[in-house]
């Protein structure tokens, strides 16, 4: 199979690493990729949202399957673009069409979907500038803290959790009337706050059947002890110790099955990954959010724990034969620790040379924000490297990643030393 993978982060490096192990792979291209992805295929200088350029490449290089890493091309309708074009409609696309991509692209759409299909989630209501007063009243009816979510995509910044009612009201007005997040906050979802511990569950689906991938837990805050600003994710572990079979049965029966059935009932086609952002409240799972892609850095622990051939599973999606495919997991535990640029998630510098990558032998170093400069590897983003390790348990995996990091150097490197702290004794 000839495959084009769209994206350029740690998620895409982990996907490329896994795809490269497939027995049916003929050639892999990654657009635009990073200094890590090119160890497993050819990087192509193409932007994933430039659909015409993607089409041209797909035709010229006789691509059979396009795997979409990030959400933006899906929300913009890349899959629909393929289906509506006779020259490329035969190409398999992994990633849902525009309609289902709203599950990530619009918080209100996702909440409506969950309400319609009785999927457990926080109580909520949605407001616009015209209903600002009703929004204030709804806030008054809720106990603190207050959860405000910009309806649209806001680069991970659109969710505010506030302790004080007057601050929440002011922020609500800023979002709706002051366009704090631009068009993304022309609608705002106000939610009941749920107290619990979060985890990420992933499935692949062809729209009829589904397979559950290994679950993971992500560490989103920049500071140790989960403090400071939110980031894209500073590390991840898999498996998640509290996600035992009783809990995962609830996730499957109360959340995954109703989601897949709900999509079918609503006539919404879905081919790709579904990422369930869940919270465990006293052993009951609730959906915090849907994403229509894999998580980052979760992919950097989920792909290593997938024993089965990924392209075989994905071919099951494009040919509607997923139910016939086999899925097996690696029994080992896995962790990843993200190395970032000093200053991230605020301003940071790029273009620092990275040393020591070749002296890491006990971990897999997935590249996130990196770029080649001749033989040198340079930093090119906030999140730079995801240092992944297997272990007989999580503690052992974490020890290996932290040991490997000692070999890697670049100016102003930062990483959290406490990944897994809340669920693993080290
Ligand atoms: P989201 O973009 O919807 O995933 O929200 C970002 C983060 O805000 C989540 O990962 C949670 O940590 C937190 N969050 C969102 N909604 C809630 C909620 N209803 N209760 C508690 N925390 C929440
Ligand atoms: N790690 C969270 C995300 O990918 O959205």
Image (tube, rainbow, N blue to C red):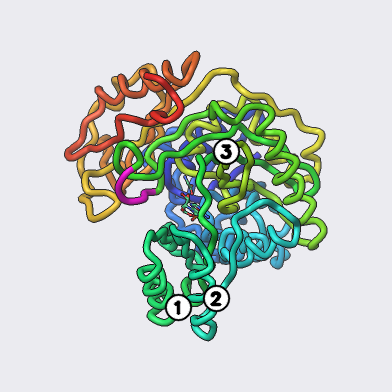
Are there few (<14), some (14-19), or many (20+) residues within 10 Å of tag 3?
Answer: some
Q: Quadrant of the image for the C terminus?
A: top left
Residue found farthest to the top: 392
Q: Which mark is residue 127?
A: 2
Instruction: Evaluate if marks 1 and 2 touch, with contact meaning CB atoms under 8 Å apart.
Output: yes
Q: Does the residue tagged 3 have its C-beta within 8 Å of any atom of ligand 2? A: no
Residue name at image x 47 percent, y 30 percent: 237
Are there few (<14), some (14-19), or many (20+) residues within 10 Å of tag 2?
Answer: many
Q: What secondary structure is marked by label 3? A: strand
**Residue position marked by numbered label 1 in the rendering:** 176
- In this view of the protein, which residue sits in the foreground, 305 or 42? 305
Residue name at image x 59 percent, y 56 percent: 122
Tell me if I can see residue 358 in this picture. Answer: yes
Let me know if residue 371 is in the magenta part: no
- In this view of the protein, which residue sits in the foreground, 151 or 119? 119
Ranked by sequence position, the earlier of labels 1 and 2 is 2
Q: Does the residue tagged 2 have its C-beta within 8 Å of any atom of ligand 1? A: no
Residue 11 placement, left or right of 230? right
Instruction: Evaluate if marks 3 and 2 touch, with contact meaning CB atoms under 8 Å apart.
Output: no
């Amino acid at each position: 199979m000839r495959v084009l993978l769209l994206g350029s982060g740690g998620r895409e490096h982990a996907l490329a690493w896994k795809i490269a192990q497939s027995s049916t792979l003929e050639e892999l291209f990654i657009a635009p990729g990073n200094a890590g992805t090119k160890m497993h295929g050819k990087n192509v200088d193409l932007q994933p949202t430039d659909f015409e350029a993607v089409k041209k490449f797909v035709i010229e290089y006789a691509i059979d399957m396009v795997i979409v890493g990030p959400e933006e091309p899906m929300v913009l309708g890349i899959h629909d673009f393929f289906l509506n074009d006779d020259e490329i409609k035969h190409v398999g696309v992994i990633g849902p069409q525009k309609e289902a991509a709203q599950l990530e692209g619009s918080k209100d759409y996702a909440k409506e979907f969950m309400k319609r299909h009785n999927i457990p989630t926080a109580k909520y209501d949605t407001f616009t500038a015209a209903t600002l007063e009703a929004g204030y009243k709804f806030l008054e009816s809720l106990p603190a803290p207050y959860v405000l979510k910009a309806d649209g995509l806001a680069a991970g910044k659109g969710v505010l959790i506030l302790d004080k009612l007057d601050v929440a009201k002011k922020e609500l007005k800023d979002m709706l009337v002051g366009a704090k997040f631009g068009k993304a906050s022309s609608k705002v979802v106000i939610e009941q706050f749920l107290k619990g511990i979060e985890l990420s569950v992933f499935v692949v689906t062809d729209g009829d059947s589904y397979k559950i991938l290994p679950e993971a837990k992500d560490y989103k805050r920049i500071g140790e002890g989960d403090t400071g600003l939110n980031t894209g994710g500073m590390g991840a572990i898999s498996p998640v110790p509290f996600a035992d079979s009783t809990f995962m049965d609830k996730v499957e029966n109360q959340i995954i099955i109703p989601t897949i059935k709900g999509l079918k009932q609503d006539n919404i086609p879905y081919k790709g990954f579904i990422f369930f952002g869940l919270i465990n409240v006293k052993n009951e799972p609730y959906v915090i959010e849907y994403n229509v892609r894999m998580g980052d850095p979760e992919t950097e622990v989920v792909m290593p724990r997938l024993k089965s051939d990924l392209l075989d599973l994905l071919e099951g999606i494009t040919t509607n034969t997923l139910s016939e495919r086999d899925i097996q997991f690696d029994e080992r535990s896995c962790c990843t620790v993200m190395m970032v640029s000093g200053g991230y998630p605020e301003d940071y510098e790029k273009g620092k040379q990275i040393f020591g990558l070749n002296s890491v032998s006990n971990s897999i170093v997935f590249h996130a924000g990196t770029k080649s400069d001749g033989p040198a590897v340079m930093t090119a983003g906030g999140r730079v490297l995801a240092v992944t390790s297997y272990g007989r348990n999580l503690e052992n995996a974490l020890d290996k990643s932290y040991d490997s990091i000692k070999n890697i150097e670049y100016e102003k490197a930062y990483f959290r030393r406490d990944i897994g702290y809340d669920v693993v004794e080290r």
